[in-house]
Image: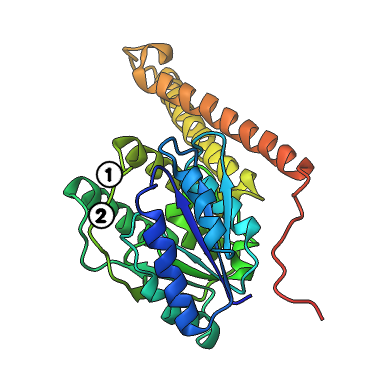
Amino acid sequence: MDISVIVPLYNEVESLPELTEWIRRVMNKAGFSYEIILVDDGSDDGSWEKIEELKYNHPNILGIKFRRNYGKSAALNVGFEASQGDVIITMDADLQDSPDEIPELYRRIREEKFDLISGWKQKRYDPLTKTIPTKFFNSVTRQMSGIHNLHDFNCGLKAYRSEVVKSIEVYGEMHRYIPVIAKWAGFKNIGEQVVEHRARKYGKTKFGFSRFVNGFLDLLSIFFVGKFAKRPMHFFGTLGVLSFFTGTVIALWIIGEKLFHIANHIKYSREVTSQPLFFIALVAIIVGFQLFLTGFIAELVSRNAPERNSYQIAKTV
């Protein structure tokens, strides 16, 4: 099969007939063999009933329904597992992504050998409450991930080689950082394509303030897991040693200063334990010890985890 189109959706009953028919026209015109995977993320507006209705007229449709709303990342992850195409296309169900982009995305994956291509909506029709946080996250993600050629990490319209989606796991709110996850998994040939962004025709945006907070926390999580998942002691141990060493040096300095005053019969006005710096040193020593112990425990957990020696293998011969 040439293409799997994965569409996560939540309360998008009005747009589904138009979207699936649009995808069908594009696929038939280009001569692709394809499937459309519609993942209903716990909709309560009749979206699932519409998917069942569409299935009768579109044998290429595969519907998956969640019992409750888990989020876009969960919907994409399940769609990735179910996909059978050589190239995977993801797009939103609100008709703001254009299926007309699919043939060019497919061509670039197959002919230019990209692992992943992310869309870039240069001209957006979203409100400022969505565009401003998006620009902030894109800027921070570029700096932290080192993927400097992407302008829009969170664009729903993306194309992947099948091997990419079968090698990664998406959860939480991490769908907006899939290029970063793919890079950590070893897929570094990541490209970008300018795509059309259309004004929302039906329904309303699902973006809220909670996604702003969750997105930032997930960015930190991805950075930590990508760097230190298999060597947590390198992170916690380094911080612990630095904190312990700093606290110890400060404490020894204070004690040495008092001993110097005593040995030279110089009046020393304050006791060691009455100085704020002493308590700062004590806290640094305790925190350093705790961080080191955390790293040690995390290392034991990592070494005993069933996937401790699970690594991405590109080829065998």
Can residue 108 be seen here? The reply is no
Identity of the residue drawn at 47% across and 52% down: 8
Circle 1 — which element?
Answer: loop
- Residue tagged by mark 2? 200
Question: Which quadrant of the view contains residue 186?
Answer: bottom right
Judge by depth and name the residue closer to the eye, 285 or 78.
78
- Residue tagged by mark 1? 204
Confirm or deny contact between disc 1 and disc 2 (CB under 8 A): yes
* 195 on left or right of 131: right
Identity of the residue drawn at 42% across and 19% down: 279
Please determine whether, in this image, residue 317 is positioned above or below residue 67. below
The scheme the figure's colours follow is: rainbow
Judge by depth and name the residue closer to the eye, 99 or 79.
99
Q: Residue 229 location in percent, x, y?
A: 62, 49
Judge by depth and name the residue closer to the eye, 81 or 143.
81
Can residue 188 be seen here? The reply is yes
User: Gap in Å between the C-alphas at discs 1 and 2?
Assistant: 8 Å
